[in-house]
Image (spheres, grey):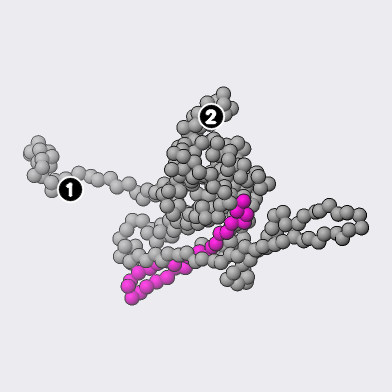
Amino acid sequence: METRLNQWITTGTGTAGTLLLPRLILGPLLEEVDKFLLPRELAAEVFSPAMLANKGGVFNINLDVPNSLDVRETGEGAEIPMDAMEHTNVTFTPTKFGVAIRITREMMEDTQFELLNRNIRMTGKRFGEKETELIIDLLVAGTGATTAGGDAVTIANIVESMFDLEDNDYSPSDFLIGTEILQDLRNIDTFVEANKVGNTDMLRRGFLGTVYGMNVVRFSTNAVSTAAYRRRAFVIDRLHAYMLAIWRDITVENFDLPLFDMQGAAITWRFDTQIKRSEAVSMITTN
């Protein structure tokens, strides 16, 4: 009888017999991979909700106009030329971002996972990705100079963008790169051969920590608004490139919908980012 049962549950006609076989279900729900995002310390200024409290819906900061005051040669007994600094301003206007999560009571009763809390945690990640997206969009639109590369970024492209900043008295501090630019760097033998670059970081780690003294910061293709940005790189002076203003940090408000037998959460964020000095940003493009 035992032999016949074993034969039965292993044949195609004995599908019901598979219920006799134990099935192991892994307890945890496996999360998606984290993306490479731009850290906030790259911003020249970060205006927090505490700083913007009771400042209204629009926030302005004043900036000196570079090179707007000049000293001139003055002859003996001649009138001294008049001059003064010029100023400009940058206006921040908050944009509200948000999402409402709604989950039926039955789903929360029957599932083995805390769906509402898990969705809230994932939303926090999405807000971080949105911040990187907005910054890259801003740098693309507000760059002070553009270096047009070919099919791949070259050392000459990087040096030209560094020159764009230095020619305006800014210091290149960071090199923000998309994934295809990273691929290009790996194909430049200068960054691979130890006798040229002085180390073997690219071979050991697959990534360079610095290029010509600039910190290399990678951003994920799936964290920006268009896949074409994987072919973009930015040389910036972090002390002068862009600024962030946060009117309301990520806020979670739980709610009940008895009529629909649902529970949920409304998660919102008020944020804006602006260029501080366009000359402190140079973009490299490739095909």
Residue 249 seen in the current view? no
- Numbered mark located on residue 19 in the image: 1
Q: Name the secondary structure under disc 2.
A: helix
Name the amino acid type tagged 2: Thr
Nearer-the-camera pick, 12 or 226: 226
Nearer-the-camera pick, 276 or 17: 276
Nearer-the-camera pick, 108 or 76: 76
The structure residue drawn at horizontal position 59% and vertical position 27%, both measured from the top left corner, is 198
Residue 262 included in the magenta stretch of the image: yes
Nearer-the-camera pick, 171 or 285: 285
Residue 67 seen in the current view? yes
For residue 114, which quarter of the picture?
bottom left
Name the amino acid type tagged 1: Leu
For label 1, the crowd category at 10 Å Cα-Cα, with few meaning under 14, some 14 to 19 and many 20 or more, is few
Magenta stretch secondary structure, dominant: strand
For label 2, the crowd category at 10 Å Cα-Cα, with few meaning under 14, some 14 to 19 and many 20 or more, is some
- Numbered mark located on residue 154 in the image: none
The structure residue drawn at horizontal position 70% and vertical position 62%, both measured from the top left corner, is 87
Give the CA distance from mark 2 to mark 1. 61 Å
Q: Nearer the viewer, mark 2 or mark 1?
A: 2
Position of 165 with respect to 26 (left or right) is right
The structure residue drawn at horizontal position 37% and vertical position 73%, both measured from the top left corner, is 257
Q: Which residue is farthest top?
A: 195
Q: Which residues are magenta?
A: 251-279
The residue that disc 2 covers is: 190
Residue 30 location (% of width, % of height): 37, 48
Position of 194 with respect to 112 (left or right) is right
